[in-house]
Image (cartoon, grey):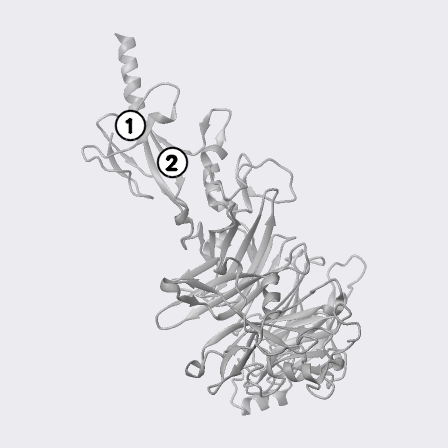
Amino acid sequence: MARTGAARGRRLLLDALLLCALLPQPDTAWKQHAPRLRVTYKDLLKSNSSRLLLTSGDGLGFQALLLDEDRAWLMVGAKNHIFLLHLDHPGREPEKIFWPASREQVEHCRLAGKDVETECANFIRLLQPYNSSHVFACGTGSYQPVCAFIQLGARGKGAGAPLMRLVTHSLQSGRGRCPYSPRQPFTALLVDGEMYSGTSSDFMGSSAAFFRTWVRGAEQSYIRTEQNQDHWLHEPAFVGAFAIPDTYNPHDDKVYIFFRETALEAGQWDRRHIHARVARVCKNDVGGKRSLINRWSTFLKARLVCSIPGPQGTQTHFDQLEDVFLLRTRDPQNPLIFGLFTVSSGVFSGSAVCVYSMAAIRAAFSGPFAHKEGFDYRWVEYKGRVPYPRPGMCPSETYDPLLRSTKDFPDEVISFVRSHQLMWEPVQPQGRQPVLVRVNVPYRLRRLLVHRLETESRHYDVLFLGTDEGKVLKVGLASTVSHSTEVINLEEISVSKTPSPILDMKLSPKRQELLVSSTHGLLQLALYRCELYGKTCTDCCLARDPYCTWDGKTCAPHLLTEKRRARCQDVLKPDVLSQCQDTAEGTAVATEKLVFGVEKNSTFLECLARSPQTTIRWLAWHGEGSGLSEDWRPLRRAGAGAADPPAGQGGCRHL
């Protein structure tokens, strides 16, 4: 009898055994906007994964960042100052250059109606490496742009980071290189001693152009887009510029420019419609001989399309190009272009990221031209004869050994280029749709940075997105077997105490850090916060963060350079029941919590999910033996036959 009673008691106890399991939601739920972690600014400071480097009191922040990973320093442009921070020595005081505008320039700016504190100063907006010992810097100069060289000199034997000083005799005009205003968008790229820049060219900011100047040459040695020609550029806002080789011949190298402008081809009734553009020029372009003197003779542009399909074939276009990122690949001629776009209207607002291949961009520039035709001058495809050599082609022996300079182009080619800058075919993104869309959210995306992680089986692209309210979103993009892209929302990090727009971001893969500047400060941020995901293998794997892995004891950073056995590295397959299997005990680590109760009594069941991307299931044991999976059954409320408790909630349940 005693043995029978003991067996019955053991049976009752097993009947009351409950298991709380965390399971990933269906795939559609992964595409929701909810991140795996939301980190407040206070929590960020507690996590020891960030460090405040500089603060800004003027509310304009730090708009120019230059990172040298090899020498572990960061140069920062601010109001009247340039700072040099030593990343390997956080306790060392930053080196500083004081570079204000003259009193006369400040007074002239004030008399022109500008604000003395927020506009009439020298705001450093351009920092470009010139060589190993010099950096080329430009500032607004109180609405009189000015540029100069910063010299980096060795401190002494074994002293570490270099000193820096302003080379005063190198002061030169910054017109055509740097904007007059501290707030105007612009882009600049220094290549082989030549500065390519898209910026305003006058005090009022009403005229903008794309320039090339020689930073050590005479001021008159420049080339630019044609003036007062709206079909060249119409109210442009420049976003980025990159030098990308087209062939193995350096004479074919081109500079690609990304911007947005008011589109003329949108029609006379929609003159204010904005289009995103990609343009290109040949690096060896020196202008025409009898026409287009000191003007680009290879300048062409095409539309960048980033849209989502709608009902009945309609498209919702994201045309406001905000930022662009060039992801270098193993093939230097074929990097990937990531574009960040926004749209704003009375009905709809949101942001999107589209990815473009260089093959698609080159195809647009090799396609038909657009021009105006007919009694109403509508923009149509040009079907007439295209002169030889093809307009936009670089003078190179690759195509014609007799053409050694753009001044050798026939007059017919120069005349055609002067009136046909726009290509007819737009550039479509990969998959013909965005890889990321954010709509109906309380923020807008403003800055974009991409980090590619290579693994044995595939690669992952991690997007860092800066918002207009001081947050950085970390989003993973994983390519599936069907060549589609799965979006994994990882983190939403508040990087400033008060909401403020993100101005710039720089990635340091070597240090596994992100440098983020906002209108209120500069922050050094680790790429991962693995310990915040939880203390179990399940939490770590369900996070699907490619920077983190379960090492057997903790959720730890997964450094690709390390050779160690890790459990959950494939973010596409978060199968925690197999990845987190404890081979020693034969039970799954996914068993988060075991609860023992008494039959016909009440027990409070609580199991809060750390991630909004998971669901909660309570399972009750209904068998005895070795623990076969079919003996675990979903828990139902007594007398009601109801389903499992709602995700993330506990409650009193009758056993």
Q: Which mark is residue 224?
A: none
493 up-or-down from 205: above or below: above
Q: Secondary structure at mark 2?
A: strand
Total numbered circles: 2
93 up-or-down from 148: above or below: above
View extreme (right): residue: 157
Quarter of the picture holding the C terminus: top left
598 up-or-down from 572: above or below: above
What residue is shown at x 44% (from left), y 60% (from top)? Answer: 437
Q: Nearer the viewer, residue 423 or 563?
A: 423
In the rendered structure, the answer to whether residue 12 lies left or right of residue 216 reads left
Q: Nearer the viewer, residue 331 or 600?
A: 331
Name the residue carrying label 2: 21
Q: CA distance from mark 1 to mark 2?
A: 18 Å
Quadrant position of residue 233: bottom right
Quarter of the picture holding the N terminus: top left
For the residue marked with disc 2, what is the amino acid? Ala
Residue 409: image x %, image y %?
73, 80
Q: Secondary structure at mark 1?
A: loop
View extreme (left): residue: 639
Label 2 environment density (alpha carbons within 10 Å; few <14, some 14–19, many ≥20): many
Label 1 environment density (alpha carbons within 10 Å; few <14, some 14–19, many ≥20): some
What residue is shown at x 52% (from left), y 45% (from top)? Answer: 481
Q: Which tag, 1 or 2, sits closer to the chain's start?
A: 2
Name the residue carrying label 1: 597
Q: Nearer the viewer, residue 498 or 501?
A: 501
Residue 586: image x %, image y %?
47, 25
Q: Is residue 479 visible?
A: yes
For the residue marked with disc 1, what is the amino acid? Gly
